[in-house]
Image (cartoon, grey):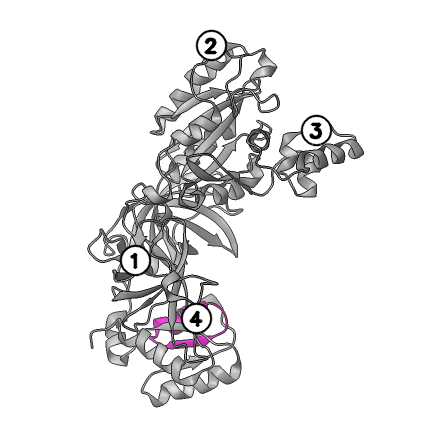
Amino acid sequence: MADEKLHMNIVVAGHVDHGKSTVIGRLLADTHTLPDGKIEGIRELCRRTGKPFEYAFLLDALKDERAQGITIDTARCFFETEKRKYIIIDAPGHIEFLKNMITGASRADAALLVIDAAEGICENSRRHGYMLEMLGITQIAVLVNKIDLVGYDRAVYDGIVRDYTEFLRTIGIAPAAFIPVSAMEGDNIASHSEKTPWYDGPDVLEQLDRFEGGGHEDKKPLRIPVEDVYKFTEGGDDRRIVAGLCESGTLRAGDEVVFYPSGKSARVKTLEEWFMDADSSRRPVEFSRGKSCGFTMETQIYVRRGEIACKAGEEPPAVGRTFRASMFWLGKSPLVPGKEYIIKSCTAKTVCRIAKIHSVLDAASLGKTTDAAQARRHDIADCTIVCEREIAFDIGASLPATGRFVIVDNYEISGGGIITEVLPDEENAKGSSAAVSPAERAKYLRQKPLTVSVPDEETGRTLERALFEEGRIAYYAPRLSDEQKNALLAAGLIVLTAGDGEVTASGSLAEDVTAVLLASDNALEI
């Protein structure tokens, strides 16, 4: 059955104008995936605008992309073979849109990297290869495109194979295949071409099916980053549904799950799906990799966005504040040690600082500097990162989806990378000059410092008073700078404010007080 097929995410990367979008457009056309009339509509548009028809126009839907002939954002399309369902991600090749390329590649299982046979290996051919390795994508097929422009010359193809294989070897990647293709003419895309009799390897469609992996083959430990917890209170429905995307593993009713970094555990009562039939016998039997899912628990425990649900008895993620990472820097300002940034890993978000930059690598030239004081735009930094609070994560090579992160600087995503090593929190922590440690302060106040998002001033003031009467120290402020918020948290307070918080107030006083007390007390041994 089609619903039982494996699924796989494929990113198509490469230098600007090397033909990535054309490869995908041709693949969709030759597999008869496009809606009726789609190609004819694009041909008519090209006729009216006086442009030659290009298969890339099937994907480059933004007006300014068609005008400039480049991919600005990542485009996604879907098709299937007898073996799998595929999500194909067309990533930008222009250097100014590397951030978009990383976003597109971050969820991929394998990659097609396109190189123009006439232009050869370019700067972003190497840079994209390095970024794919950083993101844990080691299944790569290289498409030597526009082979028709060099007269299907095998010597040109062999030269690119030799040089790019050597480059990939230096970054630890063994390519699955090199395929000579002409996306415009359709050579070796969905069928073998008679114009390359010297090539006896797979065409692109065959190579996709040769990649390893897929949703139902994933036997790795369960990882479900918690997106949110949905509470139902009407009509006698008192469910609390934990929701998130299953990044790996499988989940069934009756499984015992452990949430990290809190360490809380409970047994799964039911699996839930949106628009699920009222007949309970039609509930999903299992959630697997790539599935957006929800589940209820037999024991009501407080968990929040940012935790990762794992299965008891399987290998747990690492939990800590300090780790080593390889990071691609895209910020307008340089990456510098000591400065505070925001780190986002899966659904977790916290303040962090760069404790040390161990080395900086130019991804295009592979030149390395071991005494760099900063990392500039488009550099790759090997660095130690210290977070303000504990997060759960995996070492990137083992479970890339939960080992990746992005860095936010001045409200913009400025870097992304993969965690390579967990470090003891004592290392690089520099020690604290405070006379009272955070642990001592929490024990004395009988509460963990945390932020609570409130919908309005009335809720904030009411909750502040109710917590005070429960013996907790809370402070309501509608707007706080990061510095002000961090100062209040360092003092051990429960901070009630607008914006992102570790707990979200719903306006129901009893529930809000319970949630805050659970979040404060359950993490402490008092």
Classify mark 2: helix, strand or loop: loop
The residue that label 3 is drawn on is: 53
Q: Could you tell me which secondary element the residue under label 3 belongs to?
A: loop
Q: Which tag is nearer the camera, tag 1 or tag 2?
A: 1
Q: Is residue 365 visible?
A: no
Relative to 40, say whether 282 is above or below: below
**Location of residue 193 in the rendering, given as x and y in whole percent from the top left corner:** 53, 16
First reached walking from the N terminus: tag 1 or tag 4: 1
Identified at 51% across, 12% down, the residue is 196
The mark lying in front, picked from 1 and 3, is 1
- Which of the pair 183/174 is nearer the observer? 183
Q: Percent position (x, y) of residue 108?
A: 43, 41
Determine which of the numbered discs, if any, sits on residue 198 in the image: 2
Q: Nearer the viewer, mark 4 or mark 2?
A: 2
Name the residue tied to disc 4.
485
Query: Label 1 sits on what residue type?
Result: Arg
Q: Are marks 3 and 4 in contact (CB under 8 Å)?
A: no
Amino acid identity at mark 2: Trp
Alpha carbon separation for disc pair 1 and 4:
40 Å
First of labels 2, 3 by sequence position? 3
> Bounds of the magenta span?
483-500
Query: Which disc is residue 252 wearing?
Result: 1
